[in-house]
Image (cartoon, rainbow, N blue to C red):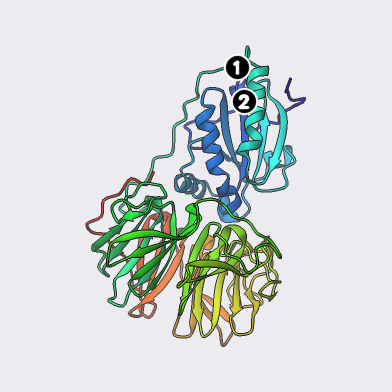
Amino acid sequence: MLTGRVNAPEINTRHGWLNTDRSYFLKDFRGKIVLLDFWTFGCINCQHILPDLKRLEKEYARELVIIGVHSAKFDAEKRQNAIRQAILKFGIEHPVVNDADFEVWKQYAINAWPTVTLIDPDGKVVGQKPGEGIYDIIKPHLDNLIATFADKLNREPFRFKAEPAPTSALKFPSKLIFDEEGNLYLSDSGHHRILKLDTTGQLLEIIGSGQRGFTDGSFEEASFQEPHGLALHGSFLYVADAKNNAIRKVNLHQRQVTTSVGTGELSYYFFHEEVGVPVNPNSPWDLAIDGNQLYIASAGNHQILRLDLETEKAYRFAGTGREALADGTFPEAAFNQPSGLALLERTLYIADPEASAVRALHLDKGTVTTLIGRGLFEFGDEDGDFDEAYLQHCMGITAHAGTLYLADTYNGKVKELNLQKKRIRTVVAGLEEPNDVHFHQDLLWITNTNAHELWKVNLKTGEREIVTIKGVVAGAGR
């Protein structure tokens, strides 16, 4: 017989609830099996367990209630609206309590993101499980609890009032890139598609059905799941299909989408594992091309991969796989959810968000160094000399005229990095989690992701324009 022994601590906090129209106490779920998911929305590992939670919610809809406990790592993640946007971005259907002060986290003695805690129908803690891959571990316990508490179970499903979804033309626009004709390709990640636009915002092409999925085929048939990074190579567009753990290849002439590498499954390899043999990406977030080599920011396994475009095989390139701010040779260095790439003069610059860092991968020297950043829990908003500056979860980076520009995502800013003077300064502020920046015709283009907007800014005059997207329907985005 499976039962808990310790009374579960209360989960209600003064910061309130989201994805529901009321607050809850544990007593409200008496007679239900409760699974608490302790998470923070910028953590890629927390994002990885969401499919397992969805699967459990569907299979045990009558017996199980899942509650998200959002215990934020970064200051920006504590804000109610930021959590609301994350709920919408990831399609979370269960209620979430804002644990901004870590009250619930401490009561449950949690020490890692993500961690799930199982509570029996009498309100007692059964156990905890940190990390990913929870489905196969939690399912047998649910079956045992259902058998043990058969007479006590409340089998009436709870109905929660979900956050209203945005209805704008764009939904969480992510990465962007321009072609030789001056048109741009934009990852409309919340709608699971790629848009081709001209510089006035007029729609030229839609790549993908708009349905969440992993299907090759024509532009109308193909499906993606949260596409992000983009790279052009001749008549081919490469797409970092993040939540499908794949790199997709778009033949722009034939209007066909295929899969270059990736099976949809998460792949992990650390230190000396899988060196010199083909691997699959893990939540690829951005791409950069150098000749016939495609560099991949493999955010989920904290590494940089390199894909040979002729053989279409990807290999480990830099990073041990552990999450850390460590410089050194390519095999010794460690990254922190790398999410942005920019190539400048044989150096691959990397936005390394979980350490709020900017890294430099020197292709000819075979080494990695840190420009800005101190570690996983060192962040802020300070301009100035590189060794005094602080960032907060920066996710996008581009090079222009020998200078780097950075989407300092959680600070809601774009910052300029002067590599000669080793100084950083803010050039655009007032954004909502910008994910990418790019220059075209001396204008700075920005994906203002959580506002579902595309901006262009003239840095010389300060003039800003929100680009109106014309000819685009909102799309399914489920």
Question: Is there a contact, CB below 8 Å, between mark 1 and mark 2?
Answer: yes
To which quarter of the image does residue 258 belong?
A: bottom left
Quadrant of image for the N terminus? top right
Horizontal and vertical percent position of residue 22: 50, 30
Q: Which residue is mark 2?
A: 33
Badge 2: residue crowd in 10 Å (few <14, some 14–19, many ≥20): many
Q: Is residue 211 above or below residue 259?
A: above
Horizontal and vertical percent position of residue 474: 30, 49
Q: Is residue 439 visible?
A: yes
Badge 1: residue crowd in 10 Å (few <14, some 14–19, many ≥20): many
Q: Looking at this view, is 375 or 341 the one in front?
A: 341
What residue is drawn where x is 57% and y is 68%? 315
To which quarter of the image does residue 379 belong?
A: bottom right
Q: Is residue 43 visible?
A: no
What residue is drawn where x is 56% and y is 71%? 350
Q: Which residue is mark 1?
A: 153
Q: Is residue 399 left or right of residue 420?
A: left
